[in-house]
Amino acid sequence: MKTWKKAVLCVCAVVFAVATVTVIVNAGGPPLKEKTCSACHSDYAKILPKPHPDVDKSAPCLSCHAQKPGSDEPTKFSTGVHKAHQGEKTKLECNACHAL
Ligand code: HEC
Ligand code: HEC
Ligand code: HEC
């Protein structure tokens, strides 16, 4: 095999390995910081969307809306949270909530 072909194969293997690790590490989305919501919101009743199932209004959102481990499918919850903070109500950097 010609040297340049070996080099191309090698680069491809490295890129693939890095991509695979990145996907595994980020499964379920980038990790959230501790106290993600209460850092800025002291009153959960105010950020509970309407309509919402009737729940204890002082319970942390993430106590019910934790993502399934290993799933990075957006949920209604994560979609709503992202929308609210990416232009709809305010604009936050990703690392306001995610530990990046
Ligand atoms: C860095 C500060 C910050 C963090 C962290 C944060 N928010 Fe917010 N959020 C805001 C600001 C500012 C607004 C816009 C003003 C308002 O409505 O209070 C907002 C608005 C919202 C709204 C829209 C409220 C409405 O008026 O309809 C929801 C829902 C919400 N946040 C939920 C959350 C949840 C859930 C989390 C945790 C995953 C979170 N926020 C984390 C600052 C933050
Ligand atoms: C005691 C459990 C519980 C708590 C606490 C809770 N939720 Fe929910 N939430 C639910 C259930 C159950 C549903 C309906 C099923 C679903 O859509 O996941 C729901 C649905 C939602 C939806 C989707 C509504 C729709 O259909 O479009 C959003 C957005 C949401 N919750 C945001 C929040 C926010 C923000 C907080 C914190 C202020 C919060 N929830 C706290 C249980 C909870
Ligand atoms: C206001 C807080 C907040 C901000 C700002 C935020 N996220 Fe998220 N993000 C969340 C929450 C809450 C989840 C649900 C995670 C869970 O339950 O484990 C999530 C989930 C995700 C996921 C997993 C797929 C999904 O949608 O559930 C990805 C990918 C992601 N966020 C990327 C981003 C990027 C990129 C940015 C910046 C452009 C960003 N997030 C900004 C709160 C936030």
Image: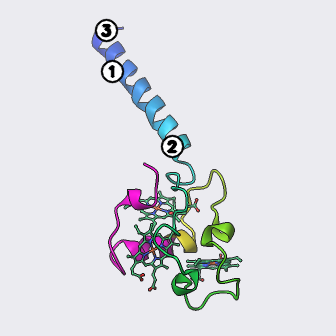
Marks 1 and 3, the one that precedes in the sequence: 3
Q: Is ligand 3 less than 8 Å from the beta carbon at label 1?
A: no
Element at label 3? loop
7 to the left or right of 16: left
- Amino acid marked by disc 2: Val
Q: Is residue 19 left or right of residue 27?
A: left
**Could you tell me residue 88's position as x and y percent?**
36, 80
Q: Is residue 2 left or right of residue 33?
A: left
Q: Residues within 10 Å of mark 3 (few under 14, many from 20)?
A: few
Residue at 70 percent across and 88 percent down: it is 54
What is the x, y in percent for residue 26? 51, 47
Q: Which residue is mark 3?
A: 2
Above or below residue 68? Residue 2 is: above
Mark linked to residue 90: none
The residue carrying mark 2 is 23
**Cα gap from disc 2 to disc 3, whole angstroms:** 32 Å
Q: Which residues are magenta?
A: 79-100
Specify the quadrant that holds the N terminus: top left
Q: Which residue is mark 1?
A: 8
The earlier-in-sequence mark between 2 and 3 is 3
Q: Is residue 49 magenta?
A: no
* Residue at horizontal 39 percent and vertical 73 percent from the top: 85
Q: Position of residue 3 (x, y in %)?
A: 30, 8
Residue 68 placement: quadrant: bottom right
Question: Does the closest atom of ligand 3 sit within 8 Å of the Cβ of label 3?
Answer: no
